[in-house]
Image (cartoon, coloured by chain):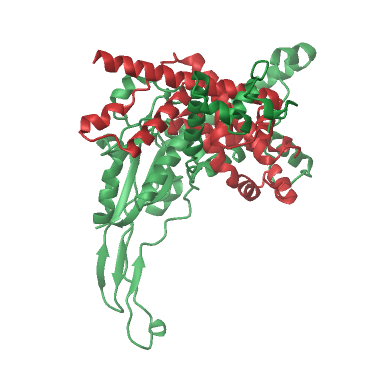
Chain colours: A red, B green
């Protein structure tokens, strides 16, 4: 992403609302998408995204231009998400996320499972499995697969070397696969008992 | 291609040493051609890698939904709405560093009264003198305030409007203004629309979302919504009442406001529109229909912004209005309220209810 216009950046850092709007509006969707996939609930994502944008606005005077604005904002957003999730984990019991899937829905409706039903089922299963991961694993998967950032950008956003990025990313993928396989086993067991 | 110095031609066939996590990641993300053969072998590992590649494809296809249109404005209201002490101090010195408010916050030095008194003993006497002055001034102020309240209220509507901080709520006269001869189009008489005279210029500015969230907790916020014809607006408003507060919705709407709360609202009469013909009597006076609704929401700028956006989507022009007298409406109790502890911490704060006044044309 190209660097921001120096004049707009300076005015935004001085608090000019129009300059802030011009600078941040192109990034708004990316900030929201990150929060949406990190916390799941739309209502929580809206509040968290607003909180992240407020932190970006307040911290803009400290932005020195060494990283791209998008990468810097991603770092602020991810940190806001991780803080929120840690706070939530301390305050409430973490209930196991049920991965109950309507695999039998097509059968209940009396129609054979179609491709569209299978795709929607796989999508919702992966979404729920993502919510069941640890925050650090979820963050790196969101940055790599949802935001489609390369390893260097992820390393810059999470402040870690590329080697660590690859290692953590692989473990996150393995954790996601583990959650999905566990759910498949549970689903198969229930089908046998039924 | 592999970047770890090993010959990719030899990988997957007769290789020595364990496969690293980076190499497995390369196989999952299809960056390492050497592992294409591994995926074809049908082993448990290769199946797992294929499954993980499928998981990645699903995540890539998730995409991102667009952010709500009000999101950045709400963040700007919250961030820029706070005054910065540094700028205020510099204004006191005469020359601020910028003609715009900086957004960074300056944390003032921590001040403790005990340390202050301990280090400057002569200020003890000053503090006692200041306390006496404050006491005398407070008593005098309370007495003056009581005397002012005891004076009879002026009788004229204009004086009553001036004494109240809110816009005048007195009667509004509609007069048909005759069209002067000089303004009549040469092609013939025309019909002019005459609206109610403007309210006195004592109306306060509409609160920002951040301020309005604070007013919700105090019970001093009213949402005024105006729209077109009732038959077209009514179905859209009814549709808004069909959901409760849940993971997808941060507010809910229900019909009606308690009579006691309605009396406290002290709403102005609905603006009437009169159609006057040239030189003749008023042809028609259109009186808007007013309906009362109660919106339940958590007192946050985001929940309020979401409510306003939905009302706008229903075809209404919305306006936030601050009232002086608190109007506390008990929100409708949902089954989810009993299970508040099962929701996210952001939803633990008790929801409040605010009145929504909808005016539409019949």
Depth check: B250 or B280 in front? B250
Name, please, the residue furthest toward the front: B14
Quadrant hosting residue B75: top right
Residue at horizontal 59 percent and vertical 39 percent from the top? B81
Coordinates of residue B92 in the picture (x, y in percent): 75, 39
Depth check: B178 or A191 in front? A191
Can see residue A46?
no
Disc tally is 0
**Is residue B137 positioned above or below B358 on the image?**
above
Residue at horizontal 70 percent and vertical 16 percent from the top? B112
Quadrant hosting residue B260: top left
Depth check: B264 or A40 in front? A40
Coordinates of residue B317 in the picture (x, y in percent): 39, 53
Q: On the rendered image, what quadrant is the N terminus of chain B found in?
A: top right
Residue at horizontal 67 percent and vertical 43 percent from the top? A15
Coordinates of residue A73 in the picture (x, y in percent): 64, 36
Coordinates of residue B83 in the picture (x, y in percent): 64, 37
Can see residue B2?
yes
**Is residue B191 positioned above or below B90 on the image?**
below
Q: Is residue B138 left or right of residue B246?
A: right
Name, please, the residue furthest toward the bottom: B186
Residue at horizontal 48 percent and vertical 22 percent from the top? A177
Q: Is residue B314 left or right of residue B118?
A: left
**Is residue B189 positioned above or below B214 on the image?**
below
Q: On the rendered image, what quadrant is the C terminus of chain B found in?
A: bottom left
Q: Is residue B259 left or right of residue B81?
A: left
């Amino acid at each position: 992403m190209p660097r921001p216009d120096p004049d707009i950046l300076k005015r935004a850092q001085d608090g000019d609302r129009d300059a802030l709007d011009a600078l941040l509006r192109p990034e708004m969707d990316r900030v929201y998408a990150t929060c949406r996939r990190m916390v799941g609930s739309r209502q929580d994502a809206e509040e968290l995204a607003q909180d992240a944008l407020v932190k970006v606005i307040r911290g803009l005077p400290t932005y020195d231009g060494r990283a791209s604005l998008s990468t810097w904002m991603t770092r602020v957003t991810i940190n806001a998400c991780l803080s929120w999730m840690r706070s939530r984990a301390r305050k409430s019991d973490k209930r196991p996320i049920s991965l109950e899937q309507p695999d039998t829905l097509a059968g209940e409706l009396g129609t054979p499972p179609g491709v569209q039903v299978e795709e929607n089922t796989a999508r919702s299963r992966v979404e729920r499995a993502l919510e069941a991961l640890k925050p650090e694993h979820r963050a790196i998967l969101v940055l790599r697969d949802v935001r489609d950032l390369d390893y260097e950008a992820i390393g810059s956003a999470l402040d870690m070397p590329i080697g660590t990025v690859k290692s953590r990313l692989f473990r996150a993928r393995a954790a996601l696969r583990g959650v999905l396989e566990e759910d498949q086993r549970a689903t198969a067991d229930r089908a046998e008992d039924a | 291609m592999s970047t770890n110095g090993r010959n990719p031609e030899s990988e997957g066939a007769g290789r020595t040493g364990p496969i690293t996590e980076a190499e497995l990641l390369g196989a999952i993300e299809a960056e390492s051609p050497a592992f294409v053969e591994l995926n074809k072998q049908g082993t448990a590992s290769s199946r797992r890698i294929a499954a993980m590649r499928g998981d990645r494809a699903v995540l890539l296809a998730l995409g991102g939904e667009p952010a709500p249109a009000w999101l950045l404005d709400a963040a700007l209201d919250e961030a820029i709405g706070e005054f910065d002490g540094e700028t205020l101090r510099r204004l006191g010195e005469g020359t601020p560093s910028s003609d715009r408010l900086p957004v960074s916050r300056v944390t003032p030095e921590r001040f403790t009264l005990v340390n202050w008194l301990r280090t400057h003993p002569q200020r003890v006497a000053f503090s006692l003198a200041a306390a006496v002055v404050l006491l005398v001034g407070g008593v005098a102020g309370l007495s003056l305030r009581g005397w002012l309240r005891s004076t009879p209220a002026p009788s004229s509507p204009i004086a009553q409007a001036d004494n109240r901080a809110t816009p005048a709520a007195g009667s509004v006269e509609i007069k048909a203004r005759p069209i002067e001869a000089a303004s009549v189009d040469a092609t013939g008489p025309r019909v002019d629309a005459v609206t109610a005279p403007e309210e006195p210029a004592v109306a306060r500015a509409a609160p920002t979302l951040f301020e309005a969230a604070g007013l919700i907790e105090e019970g001093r916020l009213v949402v005024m919504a105006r729209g077109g014809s009732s038959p077209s607006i009514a179905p859209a408003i009814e549709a808004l009442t069909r959901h409760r507060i849940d993971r997808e919705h941060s507010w809910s709407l229900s019909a009606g406001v308690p009579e006691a709360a309605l009396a406290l609202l002290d709403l102005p009469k609905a603006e009437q529109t009169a159609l006057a013909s040239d030189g003749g009597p008023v042809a028609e006076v259109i009186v808007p229909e007013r309906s009362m609704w109660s919106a339940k929401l958590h007192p946050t700028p985001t929940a309020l912004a979401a409510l306003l956006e939905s009302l706008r989507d229903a075809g209404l022009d919305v306006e936030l209005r601050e009232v002086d007298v608190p109007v506390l409406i008990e929100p409708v109790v949902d089954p989810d309220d009993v299970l508040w502890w099962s929701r996210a911490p952001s939803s633990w704060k008790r929801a409040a209810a605010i009145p929504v006044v909808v005016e539409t044309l019949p």
